[in-house]
Amino acid sequence: MEREAVRKTPAATRTFPEELADALVRLQRLVRRRLRAGLAEPRLRGAEVELLRLVESRPGVGISDAARELHLAGNSVSTLVNQLARDGYLVRETDPADRRAARLLLTGAAESRLEDWRRRRADLVGRHVARLSEPDREALRAALPALRRLAASLHDDPDEP
């Protein structure tokens, strides 16, 4: 039985949105892989880091609000919360306004881990940005506001899953 060859879209026919999405995904994947290298602690998955970062920015956020913010199912966030609480990164407190709901807070261990992650990420990206030419660095700096607006648009679009 012959395997069907994988057909790649020639670079010349790719659209700007495809190229942009591919570049962003590749950049994120490479940063994540480099940051994982040499970790003494068990690595946190992307969704776990996203949840910790959300709780850091919104202490006391509830599970359902976190699920909406992260575009995840509530039961998926509950599973993440259980894992992160078991590992000592999250504290789940009862919401005084609704005793059935939980509010999430970071532990000191999570705060330290996020700070270390941010520092290592900034060092890694900073070293590689420094290797670029000044025009490339300026182009990246100039693109930041547009990339932030693109992220906000993707996040806020009610028609998207």
Image: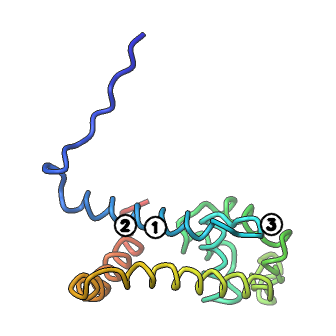
Residue lying at the far left in this picture: please name it.
12
Q: Which residue is mark 3?
A: 82
Residue beneath the point at 41% across and 67% down: 27
In the depicted view, which residue is nearer to us: 19 or 101? 19
**Quarter occupied by residue 37:** bottom right
Give the amino acid type for the residue marked by disc 3 in the picture.
Asn
Mark 2 is surrounded, within 10 Å at the Cα level, by few (under 14), some (14 to 19) or many (20 or more) other residues, namely: few
- C-beta proximity under 8 Å, tags 2 and 1: yes
**Quarter occupied by residue 69:** bottom right
The kind of secondary structure element at disc 2 is helix
Task: Check residue 28 in the rendering and tell me which mark sits there, or answer none.
Answer: 1
Mark 1 is surrounded, within 10 Å at the Cα level, by few (under 14), some (14 to 19) or many (20 or more) other residues, namely: few
Residue beneath the point at 61% across and 76% down: 65
The kind of secondary structure element at disc 3 is helix
Task: Check residue 24 in the rendering and tell me which mark sits there, or answer none.
Answer: 2
Mark 3 is surrounded, within 10 Å at the Cα level, by few (under 14), some (14 to 19) or many (20 or more) other residues, namely: some
